[in-house]
Image: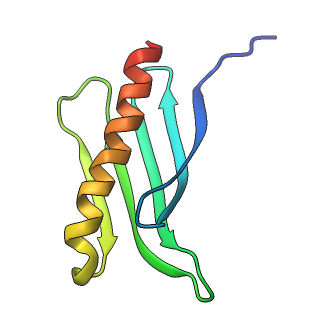
Amino acid sequence: MEIVKQNETYQISDTNEKGWEMTGTANKDVSGSLTISFAVSKPGELVESIGDCTYSKPFDNGMISVSYSVSEVKRAEFVPYMDSVIDSVLQHFNQAS
């Protein structure tokens, strides 16, 4: 029997200074490809959905793919936070390599 590891999946979460809660996953393939997917909401009596993001970085290609959904009103606040989440995950994997 052969058992071969194909990928690693990590749960990611954060609460920022605005009270936004982020939950998602980071998947790292054995080839080095990385996919990050998360949603951001603001808890309260009625949970407010802020936005969501998917980031993909293939191992053998210098190009990345980023997709996000957010209301126009929240875009200026969401995009810098989205970038900080992505940067934190990338930093984690660079340190772990």
Q: Is residue 93 above or below residue 27?
A: above
The structure residue drawn at horizontal position 54% and vertical position 46%, both measured from the top left corner, is 25
The structure residue drawn at horizontal position 59% and vertical position 29%, both measured from the top left corner, is 8
The residue at the far front in this view is 17
40 left or right, relative to 53:
right
Q: Please tell me in which quadrant of the rendered image residue 31 appears.
A: top left
Q: Is residue 47 above or below residue 77?
A: below
Residue 55's x, y, as percent? Answer: 34, 48
21 left or right, relative to 33:
right
Q: Is residue 74 above or below residue 7?
A: below
Residue 52's x, y, as percent? Answer: 41, 65
The structure residue drawn at horizontal position 59% and vertical position 88%, both measured from the top left corner, is 46
Compare residues 12 and 34 and report the one nearer the observer: 12
The residue at the far right in this view is 1
Coloring basis for residues: rainbow
Compare residues 12 and 59 and report the one nearer the observer: 12
Q: Please tell me in which quadrant of the rendered image residue 80 appears.
A: bottom left
Residue 96's x, y, as percent? Answer: 47, 16
The structure residue drawn at horizontal position 24% and vertical position 61%, both measured from the top left corner, is 79
What quarter of the picture does the C terminus occupy? top left
85 left or right, relative to 72:
right
Residue 73's x, y, as percent? Answer: 23, 83
Total numbered labels: 0
Q: Is residue 6 above or below residue 20?
A: above
What quarter of the picture does the N terminus occupy? top right
Compare residues 23 and 45 and report the one nearer the observer: 45
